[in-house]
Image: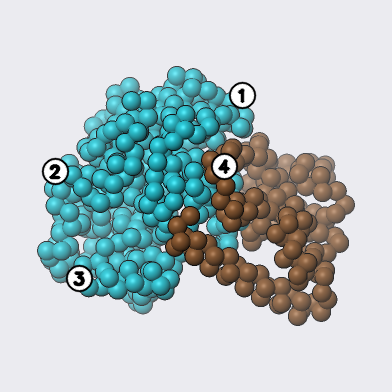
Chain colours: A cyan, B brown
């Protein structure tokens, strides 16, 4: 079959790779209809997470049609139209039972790598390096679905493919930030990053009753899209003093909940950006955490900071003093998508949650390398390139 | 592979080596013997009650397969978390240079023990052992390939 594979740092190619097949009785095979790029793919592609092997199929946000099921698959049949959670979780370990699906004990077939890095291993993720199990990604014609009953969800007839696609990762990730960040009616919420995940976090905060939601970015087209499609306030951090503006918009208190949706390749305004890059290159830090620092410093006393952006290992100048002395709650996670996807599909069916606007650049899978170039370099107003493997 | 990535992987390898050497040195200093050390308990918490983990004393197949080479303990986990399933080698584990060689060669008995514990937990909780995607990639990438080949039997467990 055809697939988009990682060949080396910043090298992608569309190649022929072996078709997936049923390997476990609970597996299914999916014919991929749509597969989206995601900001976290860029960390793998750029070599910041050095656990990729040449020939790895990338991509983890996808939907499609079930074409084969293993003998123990009970909830799906051939022909079902489903959206698949990017996180591979068993649904039956203690973590899954608590709704903490991305911490699943049984979804990662390479536990030693992340146990050595982080103490314990999280769940597997499609197309997300061998640290997360080495599962083949979704930028392909077909993909194997382990634990298919647990990770694939039927798409209601009222929801079109492009809308449903983002129930795979962006929408549940954003929802988790607002939900586990503790957004309550009347809150002021600030969101760093106006990509797909940031927009979904802002929308989730609104739906959970926040009084004001303020999203922060520097690209005009993303700010305009967020204002228009999500309906929240926006700030351009290159044109304004974000901290002062957030104080002003929250009665001097600071936001109740701060959600970071940027990750380890954060841009920093001014000369500090080069300084952060040099530190990263010299391995004084593996990740650039500017947005997290700002979220922590801007958050009100006793407020909550949720880190949605992906980080790999170590950061420098982390303001732990602010966390401690302001009594902040700091939480983070890869998405617990299985917990939210059915509810999000219902909201999509009711028209409460719009996502299709994120797919700014639909294209055939053959154009995958171009799709990532547009996305990574913010060309042509790209928010998400979305691949059609069968086109 | 790009030079930067090669450098990162090499650095990670060196760091892991230093950590392993320190652990080995610490263990040897505490034990005073080179070559073999007593094994510690390796434990997984299984989200099933003890009577399902070892019904009438019968162990899950992957652990039973290790026979008399291991000692096994099952007890109730606190807070409704199921059972604590623990195992350790009866005959001691390689130490020092022997440990490093055995780990690279895949012949350290603790690798089999860790893999058996993980597989037992998966079988009890999900009914099957999750198989990695095959083939893993379309290319050979040796350092990471070696790491993933040993991933089920290594780690902090």
Residue marked by disc 3 = A270
Q: Which residue is mark 1?
A: A71
Instruction: Tell me the CA gap for discs 3 and 2.
Output: 28 Å
Q: Is residue B155 above or below residue A13?
A: below
Nearer the observer: mark 3 or 4; the answer is: 4
- Front residue of A212/B156: it is B156
Q: Secondary structure at mark 3?
A: loop
Instruction: For marks 3 and 2, give the one nearer the viewer.
Output: 3
For label 2, the residue is: A228
At x 33% / y 42%, what residue is drawn?
A369
The quarter of the image holding the C terminus of chain A is top left
Task: In this rendered view, identify the residue nearer to me: A85 or A298.
Answer: A85
Labels 2 and 4 in the same subunit: no
Asked if the residue under mark 3 is in contact with the one under mark 1, i.e. CB atoms within 8 Å, the reply is: no
Chain for mark 2?
A
Is residue A231 toward the left or the right of residue A180 in the image?
A: left
Between the C-alphas of marks 4 and 1, the distance is: 23 Å
Q: Is residue A43 visible?
A: no
What label does residue A8 carry, if any?
A: none
As drawn, is B12 to the left or to the right of A216? Answer: right
Crowd class of label 1 (few under 14; some 14 to 19; many from 20; radius 10 Å):
few
Residue plotted at (83% across, 64% down): B92
- The numbered mark 1 sits on a residue in which chain? A
Q: Earlier in the sequence, mark 3 or mark 2?
A: 2
């Amino acid at each position: 079959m055809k697939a988009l594979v990682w060949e080396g740092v910043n090298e992608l190619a569309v190649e022929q790779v072996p078709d997936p097949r049923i390997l476990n009785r609970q597996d299914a095979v999916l014919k991929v209809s749509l597969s989206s790029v995601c900001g976290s793919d860029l960390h793998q592609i750029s070599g910041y997470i050095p656990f990729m092997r040449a020939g790895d199929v990338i991509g983890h946000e996808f939907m499609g049609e079930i074409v084969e099921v293993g003998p123990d698959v009970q909830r799906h049949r051939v022909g079902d139209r489903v959206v698949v959670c990017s996180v591979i979780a068993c649904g039956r370990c203690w973590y899954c039972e608590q709704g903490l699906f991305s911490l699943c004990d049984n979804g990662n077939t390479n536990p030693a790598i992340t146990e050595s890095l982080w103490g314990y291993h999280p769940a597997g993720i499609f197309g997300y390096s061998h640290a997360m199990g080495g599962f083949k990604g979704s930028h392909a014609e077909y993909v194997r679905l382990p634990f298919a009953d647990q990770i694939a969800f039927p798409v209601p007839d009222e929801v079109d493919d492009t809308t449903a696609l983002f129930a795979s990762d962006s929408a549940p990730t954003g929802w988790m930030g607002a939900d586990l960040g503790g957004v309550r009616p009347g809150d002021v919420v600030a969101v760093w990053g106006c990509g797909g995940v940031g927009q979904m976090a802002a929308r989730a905060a609104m739906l959970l009753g926040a009084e004001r939601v303020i999203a922060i970015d520097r690209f005009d087209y993303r700010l305009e899209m967020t204002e228009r499609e999500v309906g929240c306030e926006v700030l351009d951090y290159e044109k304004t003093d974000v901290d002062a503006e957030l104080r002003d918009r929250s009665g001097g208190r600071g936001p109740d909940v701060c959600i970071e949706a940027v990750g380890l390749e954060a841009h920093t305004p001014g000369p500090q950006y080069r300084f952060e890059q040099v530190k990263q290159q010299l391995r004084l830090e593996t990740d650039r955490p500017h947005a997290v620092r700002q979220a922590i410093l801007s958050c009100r006393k006793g407020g909550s900071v949720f880190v949605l952006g992906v980080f790999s290992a170590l950061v420098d100048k982390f303001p732990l003093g602010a966390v401690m002395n302001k009594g902040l709650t700091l939480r983070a996670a890869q998405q617990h998508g299985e917990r939210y996807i059915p509810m999000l599909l219902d909201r999509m069916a009711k028209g409460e949650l719009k996502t299709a606007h994120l797919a700014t650049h639909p294209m055939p899978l053959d154009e995958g390398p171009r799709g990532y170039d547009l996305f990574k370099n913010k060309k042509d107003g790209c928010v998400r390139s979305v691949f059609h493997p069968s086109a | 592979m790009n030079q930067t990535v090669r450098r990162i992987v090499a650095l990670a390898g060196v760091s892991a080596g230093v950590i392993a050497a320190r652990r080995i040195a610490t263990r040897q200093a505490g034990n005073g013997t080179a070559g073999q050390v007593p094994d510690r308990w390796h434990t997984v918490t299984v989200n099933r009650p003890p009577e399902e983990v070892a019904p009438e004393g019968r162990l899950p197949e992957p652990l039973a397969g290790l026979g008399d080479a291991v000692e096994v303990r099952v007890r109730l986990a606190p807070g409704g978390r199921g059972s604590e399933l623990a195992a350790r080698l009866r005959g001691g584990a390689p130490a020092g240079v022997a440990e490093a060689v055995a780990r690279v060669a895949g012949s350290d008995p603790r690798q089999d023990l860790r893999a058996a514990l993980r597989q037992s937990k998966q079988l009890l909780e999900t009914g099957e052992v999750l198989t990695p995607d095959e083939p893993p990639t379309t290319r050979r990438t040796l350092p990471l390939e070696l790491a993933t080949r040993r991933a089920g039997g290594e780690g902090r467990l």
